[in-house]
Amino acid sequence: MNLDDFQKTCHQLKRPLLVISGKRGCLTCGYLSMASFERNQDAAAIVRGVDTYQDMLEATVQEVSSHALELGVKPGMTGRQALELFQ
């Protein structure tokens, strides 16, 4: 998957805080709270145990906001599959 069409954010903490954002939603690491995405009515999916963008693509989605569910994103799919729906 070519990530050039996505906005990528990385903050180096004890582990990296990673976000890949598309036009319709974002894929994030476990640093961020699903409650915040729900409160702001954003489409988001969370993967855990990742250190790189490539890890995010291969990881299993653990949590999904209600707006992401409306786009077809579901827990259990890969980060790559979620991003395809967030493009």
Image (cartoon, rainbow, N blue to C red):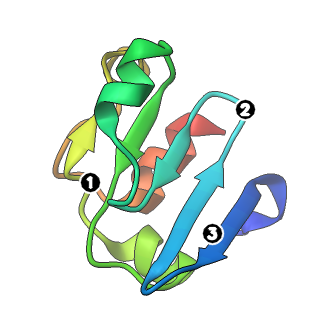
| Above-or-below relation of 42 to 30 | above
Mark seen at residue 23: 2
Q: Is residue 72 left or right of residue 26?
A: left
The mark that comes first in sequence, 3 or 2, is: 3
Residue furthest to the right in view is: 4
Image quarter in which the N terminus is found: bottom right
- Circle 1 sits on which residue? 61
SS of the residue at dot 3? loop
SS of the residue at dot 1? loop
Alpha carbon of mark 1 to alpha carbon of mark 2: how far? Answer: 19 Å
The mark that comes first in sequence, 1 or 3, is: 3
**Quarter of the image where one finds residue 35:** top left
Q: Position of residue 32 (x, y in %)?
A: 40, 49
SS of the residue at dot 2? loop
Alpha carbon of mark 1 to alpha carbon of mark 3: how far? Answer: 17 Å
Amino acid at pointer 3: Met
Image quarter in which the C terminus is found: top right
Closer to the camera, 38 or 61? 38
Taking the spot 43% from the left edge, 87% from the top edge, the residue there is 14
The mark that comes first in sequence, 1 or 2, is: 2
Q: Is residue 77 left or right of residue 14?
A: left
Does residue 68 show up? no
**Quarter of the image where one finds residue 24:** top right
Taking the spot 34% from the left edge, 50% from the top edge, the residue there is 46
Q: Nearer the viewer, mark 1 or mark 3?
A: 1
- Circle 3 sits on which residue? 1
**Quarter of the image where one finds residue 72:** top left
Amino acid at pointer 1: Val
Mark seen at residue 10: none
